Every structure is written in structure tokens, then in C-alpha cells.
Amino acid sequence: MENLPLNIKVIIGSVREGRFADKAATWIAGELAKESDVTVEVLDLNDYQMPFFNAPVSPSYKTEPYTHEAVARFTAKVAEGDAFVLVTPEYNHGTSGVLKNALDWVYPEWNHKAVGFVSYGSVGGARAVEQLRLAAIELQMASTRNAVHFNGEQYFPALFGQTPVEELFATIGAKAAPAMIKELLWWGRVLKSARTNS
């Protein structure tokens, strides 16, 4: 199982102009790509213009795929993934609306898969991650205990060009990423094996 190949999707959970999420997503995707037998793809929610969830039937009960083009494309990408890293800002003690909406449009394709987190904001975006962990349980996902957190005083200088963003990832990120990645790969492979053999 150690060399079981994994397809990992990194989801950029912000669509704001001048966001930090795309930089963090590119960095963590690069760290994941260093692992053996891992394929990584970054999914930018700017490329999936999904409406606010408005379907009459919950994704957990639907019998036919949703027909909205962006929803269908996003769902197909989620189906490909064996594990996910959600890159989230923290807004008002929670995750972004666009990321929560993306989670809400999909259900069986999330099930029995691993999820880890990279977050930023007040207290490193930890409250956004806690909110996402609750949603992950309902989506039947296995969350990593460890996450990568960037506080405002750490990422603001890099965001506004005062310090190189690479320096931030080489210091704060490099300390936190290995534990999260190790857990993500373990859960990802265990769950993929279980899905394959069930």
C-alpha cells in the first residue's frame, strides 16, 4: 500500500483579487509533487463559476448528475481525486463562502477520501479549518490532524511584496507541511485501498 498511487487535488478556496490562496496552493502542490507515486492538480474555483447551491435535491440524495456545466466539471474533478488539500482564508471566524459552496454541490465523490488544510488569517485561519473539519465529517471524509497555518503578520509582508513569498514557505511552511502531508498520504492510501477492495 505504501506505493499505491494517489491523485491529489489542491483547491484554491478564495476568488478575491490579490488573494494569497493561489500562492499557497502552488507552494503546497509543489511539496506534494515531491512525494513518490503522487499526481497533483490545482483546482481554482475561479474556473468553476458555480451558483449558490440551489438544487431541489441534496447531493447525497440525487439520482442523476446536476446539469449546471461548472458543477458537472467540478464534480468530475472531485471524482478523480483520492485526497484533497483545501487552501482557505478565514473570514469572520469561518471559511470562505465560495469554498463552502463548492463543498455543498458534491457528495458521493467526496466520500471516503482524505483531506488536509492550508489556512491563513487571524490565528492562522485555524477557525476556518475547524469549520471545514465539521463539514468534512458530514461528507464522510477523513481529516488530517495537522494543518499548515499562516498568521497575518507572517503572510501580509509576502502578500504585499515586502518580503519574498518563497521565504515564508521555506520557513513557516516547511516546518508545518511534512506532518500534514504524511498524514494525508497515509489516510489517502488506506482509504483508496478500502474503496478499491469494497
Image: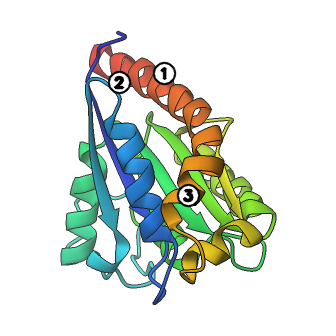
The residue pinned by badge 3 equals 167
The residue pinned by badge 1 equals 186
Circle on res. 192: 2
| Residue 138 visible, this angle | no
State the residue in front, 117 or 134. Answer: 117
Amino acid, disc 2: Lys
In the displayed structure image, the side of residue 91 where residue 101 appears, left or right: left
| Label 1 with label 3: CB-CB less than 8 Å | no
Q: CA distance from mark 1 to mark 2?
A: 10 Å
Comparing marks 1 and 3, which lies closer to the viewer?
3
Point 78% across, 72% down: residue: 93
Residue 137 percent across, percent down from the top left: 62, 44
Q: Is residue 28 above or below residue 75?
A: above
Crowding near the residue tagged with mark 1, few <14, some 14–19, many ≥20 C-alpha atoms within 10 Å: some
In the displayed structure image, the side of residue 77 where residue 179 appears, left or right: right
Point 48% across, 21% down: residue: 186
